Amino acid sequence: MNLAKYKKNICMGNIKIRKALFLLNIIQIKCLIVLDKNKKLIGTLTDGDIRRSLVNGAKFNEGIINYINKRPLSIHKKDYLKNKNLKNFEIPKDISLIPLIDKKKKLVGIIKNYKFEQLKILS
């Protein structure tokens, strides 16, 4: 739930594809949590999202906003605090980070999906 631990995975929605690739290259978990200027969750971006955008004609100096996943899996803080266990949520194994949001969609935490880590180790 610690935001500080994953601060390199957080970016603003106005960055360019080139910057997003740079950020994804330096972080261990290859997922960016994308926020607007009010720190509200607007989506996520993975290296796969960028590859698909480039294959479809995107340019490196283009903004990421058109290529983010605008409907990412997220968990409301209230629900998480009630359950305190990701096993109570149906989370696909390929999701690496889960944004924790408040009722106004502001990012209040990030949860690492340990199913993803186990999948990575087994692969």
Image: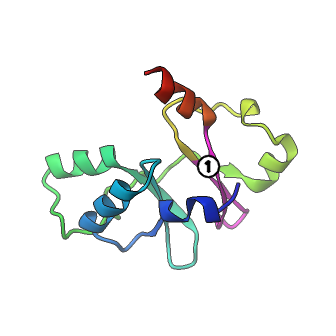
Q: Which residue sits at x=26%, y=63%?
A: 17
Residue 116 position within the rendered picture, expressed as x and y whole percent measured from the top left: 54, 33
Q: Residue furthest bottom?
A: 37
Does the image show residue 92?
no
Which is nearer the eye, 58 or 104?
58
Amino acid type at mark 1: Ser
Q: Main secondary structure of the magenta part?
A: strand
Image quadrant in which you'd find residue 68 = bottom left
62 to the left or right of 93: left
Residue 82 position within the rendered picture, expressed as x and y whole percent measured from the top left: 87, 45
Quick check: 94 above or below 82?
Answer: above
36 to the left or right of 19: right
Q: Residue furthest top?
A: 122
Q: Mark 1 packing: few (<14 Cα in 10 Å), some, or many (20+)? A: some
In this picture, which residue range is highlighted in magenta? 98-113
Q: Which residue sits at x=55%, y=33%?
A: 117
75 to the left or right of 71: right
Q: Which residue is mark 1?
A: 74
Look at the image and tell me in which quarter the C terminus lies.
top left
Image quadrant in which you'd find residue 58 = bottom left
Residue 34 position within the rendered picture, expressed as x and y whole percent measured from the top left: 47, 63
